[in-house]
Image (cartoon, grey):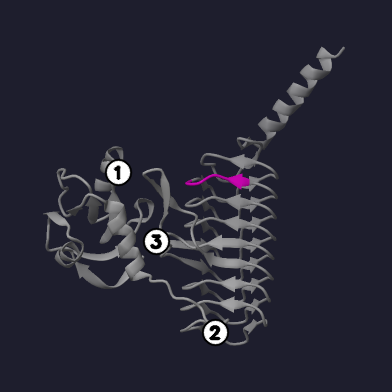
Amino acid sequence: MNFQNPVSVTEIAQKYGLKIYGDASLFALGINEIHKVRPGDITFVDVEKYYAKSLNSAATIIIINKEVPCPDGKVLLITDDPFAVYNQMVWEQRPMKYLTSDRGENLKIGDNTHIDYGAVIGHDVIIGNDCYIQSGAFIGDGTIIGDRVNIQAGALIGTDAFYFKKINGHYTKWRSGGRVIIENDVEIGAGCTINRGVSGETIIGEGTKMDCQVHIGHGVVIGKHCLIIAQTGIAGKSSIGDYSTIYGQVGIAQNVHIGAKSVILGKSGVSKDLEGGKTYYGTPAGDAKEKFREIAAVKMLIDESTI
């Protein structure tokens, strides 16, 4: 998530009562959770086993709960509760803006786009040319939709990330400050749900077609010209390569990367990265031919045992 304008480290430290350790002359350009960080970003860490990952990441500014050696070119902002500071900063950058009608503020709609009666569009939404949004669809704040996009009835786009941090036995919700970006020529089926990112973008690539009742978690990146069939669920921060096909009722775990031109057969469960250009089946998903041989071998053993 980018800031509208760079913010100095000293200003941030003064506002939130943080101790500066490192280069105090730096400026923050944005804020992101660790898997999305870029140079100039703020991130946070409050568990010691993740210190190295955060300190060695692309992030320039790390909110942390302990003074440790600061890498060159970075700055640490020290506080007892890094998550609370991080979450508050996201809230301030993306404050809650309630809807009082079915059309939000700063809505931009392209030529020849039709939005049915009964569709609800949030604030700061951009919709391209030649789109069709059916009744009952919801488009959340900050969503960007390209040209020639069809969104069928009951699709919910830009809903909050399902993302919580456990603190003292209770779950505290992260503010969803990210967006959904839908590129050109995408089809979103009826009843699909697409969460926005916590701080980055959830992206549906150009030409991708989604059947009904597909769920896309926060920060997921779907490549170009993919086919995703009904009742598939893709958990947060996973990515799908271009020209991939995912058949019905597939479940994909979080933080998984699936290579381009993959085919995942129905009812499979994906729990780890998959190489592109292959067909997969089963739970856990593996090479389809090997899985089918395993099934045949087990069947033969059962048949022999009954003789």
Q: Nearer the viewer, residue 239 or 87?
A: 87
Residue 253 falls within the magenta-colored stretch? yes
Q: Where is residue 49 in the image (x, y as percent from the top left)?
A: 30, 37
Image quadrant where one finds the C terminus: top right
Q: Which residue is drawn at the image coordinates 60% and 56% (left, top)?
A: 215
Q: How far apart are marks 2 and 1 (CA)?
A: 42 Å
Mark closest to the chain's N terminus, 2 or 3: 2
Q: How many marks?
A: 3
Three-letter amino acid code of the residue under disc 2: Ile
Q: Comparing marks 1 and 3, which lies closer to the viewer?
A: 3
Q: Position of residue 17 (x, y in %)?
A: 17, 60
Residue 160 as seen in the image, left or right of residue 168 = right
SS at badge 2: strand
Q: Mark 2 points at which residue?
A: 109
Mark closest to the chain's N terminus, 2 or 1: 1
Residue 174 falls within the magenta-colored stretch? no
Q: Which residue is drawn at the image coordinates 16% and 54% (left, top)?
A: 73
Q: Comparing marks 2 and 3, which lies closer to the viewer?
A: 3
Q: How far apart are marks 1 and 3 (CA)?
A: 18 Å
SS at badge 1: helix
Q: Mark 3 points at which residue?
A: 199
Q: Do the residues labelled 2 and 3 touch (CB within 8 Å)?
A: no
Q: Position of residue 170 (x, y in %)?
A: 42, 47
Dot 1: few (<14), some (14–19), or many (≥20) neighbours within 10 Å? few
Judge whether residue 58 can be spotted in this image: no
Q: Which of 273 and 103 is in front in this view?
A: 103
Main SS category, magenta section: loop
Q: Name the residue under label 1.
A: 53
Q: Distance between the residues labelled 2 and 3?
A: 25 Å
Residue 60 as seen in the image, left or right of residue 200 = left
Whether 274 is drawn above or below 295: the answer is below
Whether 227 is drawn above or below 165: the answer is below
